[in-house]
Amino acid sequence: AFVVTTTLISMLLPFFNNIVGLLGALAFWPLTVYFPVTMYIAQNKIPRWSSRWVAMQILSGVCLVVSVAAASGSIVGVVDALQKVYKPFHTNY
């Protein structure tokens, strides 16, 4: 049922990959970088402004910038697809 539903939605929306990219960009930074880095710092009691703490914060910041760039690219893709003539189940040969 999941595969059929996903296939139908992807056929209806020509910008389905951009929506999936947006969801991935929104979920990437907090789930795979921010929370694990914060938990590592808390569990190991790493003091603020130590070299390890600064390196972890820089890693988190860089990944945040990458996530924001990916999200903005996906939003541009959705807007671009919506501005074109949108016809569900229509292909251009």
Image (cartoon, rainbow, N blue to C red):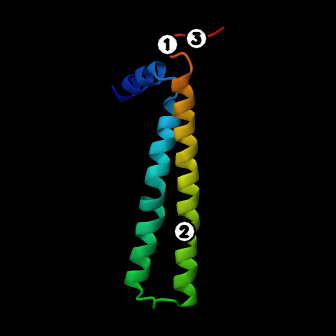
Image coordinates for residue 43, horizontal then vertical, percent: 38, 83
Within 10 angstroms of label 2, few (less than 14), some, or many (20 or more) residues? some
Q: Which residue is mark 2?
A: 61
Classify 3 as above or below 90. below
Image coordinates for residue 89, horizontal then vertical, percent: 48, 12
Quadrant in which the N terminus is drawn:
top left
Q: Nearer the viewer, mark 2 or mark 3?
A: 2
Reading the chain from its start, which is encountered first: label 1 or label 2? 2
51 and 39: which is toward the camera: 51
Tell whether 58 sits left or right of 45. Answer: right
Q: Residue at x 52, y 33 (%)?
A: 78
Reading the chain from its start, which is encountered first: label 2 or label 3? 2
Q: Which residue is mark 3?
A: 91
Disc 2 is placed on an element classified as helix
Q: Nearer the viewer, mark 3 or mark 1?
A: 1
Q: Residue at x 43, y 78 (%)?
A: 40
What type is the residue that disc 2 sits on? Gly
Which residue ends up furthest to the left in the rendered image? 1
Within 10 angstroms of label 1, few (less than 14), some, or many (20 or more) residues? few
